[in-house]
């Protein structure tokens, strides 16, 4: 979904617009100017629910390190939000890839690996969402899966319509929350039962 498509879908919920072109006039101008703020609120809620973009980073490990190896993920990944602890893989020096839990996380973003562990780590993490602004180009694509992006018009309409019709605004917010809970449940079921590896060294 693009930013332009999102704004049009939100207008369709506010005004029952049926056309496929967004019109900025005296009626819609106020709503369009408030959309970036509402969109950013929704994106933060989806990020907190683990429904925003997932990215990856590879870390080189020092097999000769005499002390614990420490990586600040907030520095290495400026958009780092949270580590997906079901998606951490160790790549050994011979290229073997295995899911691992042989690490610790401190302060939500500091990753600690034991001494004398070599190879690489492949980490998947939940990223902070992009920030929408009034000058964001309409062709900008949202870094969301389609099913998560589909929730944004509901939240945005619920915030923009509060003063016009509180009942409809509450209805849209309830629909957003119900759909968000469903997606979170689906994500949890997908991860449920994933194999977890334990430390053979007893380090973590």
Image: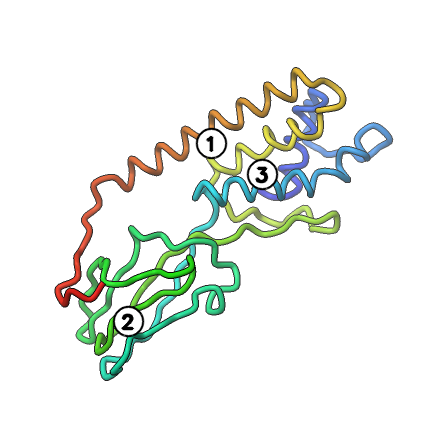
Image x and y of residue 179, in percent: 47, 27
Image x and y of residue 195, in percent: 18, 48
Residue at the far right: name it.
26
In the picture, measured across the screen, residue 129 lies left or right of residue 108, that is right
Q: Earlier in the sequence, mark 2 or mark 1?
A: 2
Numbered mark located on residue 180 in the image: 1
Q: CA distance from mark 3 to mark 2?
A: 35 Å
Q: Is residue 60 above or below residue 98?
A: below
Q: Is residue 67 above or below residue 84?
A: below
Q: CA distance from mark 2 to mark 1?
A: 35 Å
Element marked by disc 1: helix
Report the residue at 22% width, 59% height from top.
Answer: 100
Element marked by disc 2: strand
Image x and y of residue 116, in percent: 21, 78
Residue at the far top: name it.
167
Mark 1, other Cα within 10 Å: few <14 / some 14–19 / many ≥20: some
Q: Earlier in the sequence, mark 3 or mark 2?
A: 3
Mark 2, other Cα within 10 Å: few <14 / some 14–19 / many ≥20: some
Specify the quadrant that holds the N terminus.
Answer: top right
Q: Is residue 130 above or below residue 43?
A: below
Report the residue at 75% width, 37% height from top.
Answer: 32
Numbered mark located on residue 42 in the image: 3
Say which residue label 2 marks. 120
Q: Is residue 26 above or below residue 110?
A: above
In the picture, measured across the screen, residue 121 lies left or right of residue 131, that is left
Taking depth in this image into account, of 46 and 29 the one nearest to the observer is 46
Specify the quadrant that holds the C terminus.
Answer: bottom left
């Amino acid at each position: 979904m693009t930013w332009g498509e999102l704004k049009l879908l939100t207008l369709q919920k506010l005004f029952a617009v049926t056309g496929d072109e967004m019109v900025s006039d005296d009626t819609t101008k106020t709503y369009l100017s408030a959309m970036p703020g509402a969109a950013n609120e929704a994106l933060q809620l989806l990020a907190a629910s683990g429904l925003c973009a997932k990215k990856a980073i590879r870390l080189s490990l020092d097999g000769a390190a005499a002390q614990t190896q420490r990586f600040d993920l907030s520095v290495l990944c400026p958009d780092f939000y949270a580590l997906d602890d079901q998606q951490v893989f160790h790549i050994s020096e011979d290229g073997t890839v295995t899911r691992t839990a042989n690490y610790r996380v401190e302060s939500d973003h500091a990753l600690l690996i034991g001494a004398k562990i070599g190879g690489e780590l492949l980490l998947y993490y939940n990223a902070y969402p992009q920030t929408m602004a009034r000058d964001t180009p309409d062709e900008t694509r949202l870094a969301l899966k389609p099913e998560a992006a589909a929730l944004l018009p509901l939240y945005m309409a619920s915030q923009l319509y509060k003063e016009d019709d509180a009942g409809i605004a509450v209805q849209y917010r309830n629909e957003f929350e119900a759909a968000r809970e469903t997606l979170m449940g689906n994500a949890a079921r997908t991860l449920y039962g994933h194999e977890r590896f334990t430390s053979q060294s007893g380090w973590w």
